[in-house]
Amino acid sequence: MRPATAAVHYRIDPSLVHQHLYRVTLTVHAPAARQQLSLPVWIPGSYLVREFAKNLQSLSASQDGRPVALMQLDKCSWRADCDAGHPLVLTYEVAAYDTSVRTAWLDASRGFFNGTSVCLRVHGQEDEAHDIEIERPQALAGWSLATGLAPHKVARSGFGTYRARDYDELVDCPVEMGPFWSIRFTACGVPHRLVVAGAAASFDSDRLVRDVRRICQETIRLWHGEGRPPFGSYVFLLNVVADGYGGLEHRNSTALICGRRDLPRLGEERASEGYQTLLGLFSHEYFHTWNVKRLRPAQFARYDYGQENYTQLLWFFEGFTSYYDDLLLRRAALIDHASYLRVLAKTINQVLQTPGRHVQSVAQASYDAWVKYYRQDENTPNATVSYYTKGALVGLCLDLALRRDGRATLDDAMRALWQRTHGGPMDEADLLAVLQQLTGRDWSPQIAAWVHGTGELPLAELLAAHGVALTHQAAPLAQRLGLRASEGAGGVQVKTVLRGGAAEAAGFMAGDEWLGVELPGEAWRLQQLDDLLLYAGTHNQLTALLARDRRLLRLPLALPPADAAAGTVRLDVADAQAAGRWLGPA
């Protein structure tokens, strides 16, 4: 029988919508003497210290009606000068201005928060039951609430008290509030809820529900066949904005954000590219319910909310999830072979156009996520590789290599890992063990080369063995030049100069404004990068005119031929029967 009152109780008042403040009252029923509290500095799934305490203000404490002194211990921790045993009450406010899926938002049209942003952690009581009571803003009509937390005393609108088994569960269930659209459906017999906030009138809700349900069914069957998933219900929380994209996984829910133009529209039969990308996001975050929320790095067996949590395995948890997200769309018949291969080619090109793949292994990229992946700058492509994209290609290579041997697939390996770890923490040795078990041979040389090395992956060879031809194509102009640039009314702005390219050889630098080009006897102003080919004609020796710190520069530029530096690839089905054994029927 559940206790009437949890050891830790939060009351959230979202009524200050115009001030964008959540008012929080935290009651610790049996505090320790000199009770310590802290707010997380990061949120699991997003590997960057974000300093959520910067949004906390007006913190005060009392006990038995008397004020209690608070001493700040560091940037996110406090100690209350309280006695043991008597209830300790703390009040504070949290500023909510972040529209992303990571923090908190509040205005008169919508509220959203993650517990890591609003719920102080009571040290020593993390494993006790936690209640969170969310009040309904009386001045706002038509608001409802959705969350993956278990209801304790909840009204039909969703407002009321929810109970979490411990602090980890409390902060792993985001909360959505507002006049959102919502529908419930089942996948493989499991209740699911889809919540959409901010959609336009053209939104084809029936199509989205139908397609998301197919993704859920395909994913559950991959992991469990006809069995049940490790959750009793699931909630998708989708926030629709003018322009945005992203998601963050949780144990039985996910928070998503997309642009309004990416939603399916009434009367449109053909899925737009933006909608296909959105379905891939749904697939990605749902797959994480198994791969990182339960099957997770051993280093994440217990989160440390006060500092970075390092692992070399994000290539597996984010990369393999990225491999499966679009593959599951293909298996669910939401995209065809050609669409899937276009998306896969895009991933390959992103890796091939990153010189940093020769500098940093994907295991190192995982470990460095805290200081490099989320803090990208003009040198990032030259020094790092994405554990998402290269990790996805490692998953592709491993799957195709297993299939070529004929004894197993990556699906088999994922299920075997789940069984071996009982859906819990794992390390690289567990992956190698299940590969050995399934195939009877050692896969450590491949993992060492593909994951811990910086050489090229055997993509063409493995794809060819499964009926897919990889063809190199002439690189786009920016890739030929070895730079990345933005274009606008002001002309061409250099963002990145890639290692080993013509732009680097000429002396270009990130931040330069590319003004024009000189040829023998004439000079031209550049408005966009393609103007270069218009004005160069047959000339391949040019003088680039740039502005750097308001100084005008003339740099000699050798324009590489169009067939140089095969920087892009194309994928096509060469053997439909062989490709079908991997991708399913066309």
Image: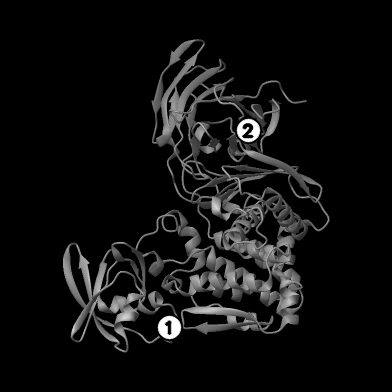
In-image side of 415 versus 459 (left or right) = right
- What is the x, y in percent for residue 173? 61, 39
Residue furthest toward the top? 65
In which quadrant of the rendered image does the N terminus lie?
top right
- What is the x, y in percent for residue 41? 46, 41
Question: Image quadrant of residue 236?
Answer: top right
Residue 198 visible to an observer of this rendering? yes
Q: As shown in the figure, which amino acid type bears the numbered disc 1? A: Ala
User: Image height check: is 285 above or below 150?
Assistant: below
- Judge the density around disc 1: few (<14), some (14-19), many (≥20) Cα neighbours within 10 Å: some
User: Image height check: is 49 above or below 531?
Assistant: above
In-image side of 540 versus 116 (left or right) = left
User: Image height check: is 367 above or below 463?
Assistant: above
What residue lies at 49% left-to-right and 71% top-to-bottom? Answer: 351
What residue lies at 68% left-to-right and 83% top-to-bottom? Answer: 465
Q: Which is more foreground, mark 2 or mark 1?
A: 2
Residue furthest toward the bottom? 538
Residue highlighted by disc 2: 145
In-image side of 308 versus 324 (left or right) = left
Residue 440 visible to an observer of this rendering? no
User: Image height check: is 283 above or below 16?
Assistant: below
Q: As shown in the figure, which amino acid type bears the numbered disc 2? A: Leu
- Judge the density around disc 2: few (<14), some (14-19), many (≥20) Cα neighbours within 10 Å: many
Spatial separation of the CA atoms under disc 2 and disc 1? 53 Å
Question: Image quadrant of residue 327?
Answer: bottom right
- What is the x, y in percent for residue 333? 73, 65
- What is the x, y in percent for residue 330? 69, 66
- Which type of secondary structure does the marked residue at label 1 adopt? loop
Q: Nearer the viewer, residue 217 or 306?
A: 217
Residue highlighted by disc 1: 565
Residue furthest toward the left? 551
- Which type of secondary structure does the marked residue at label 2 adopt? strand
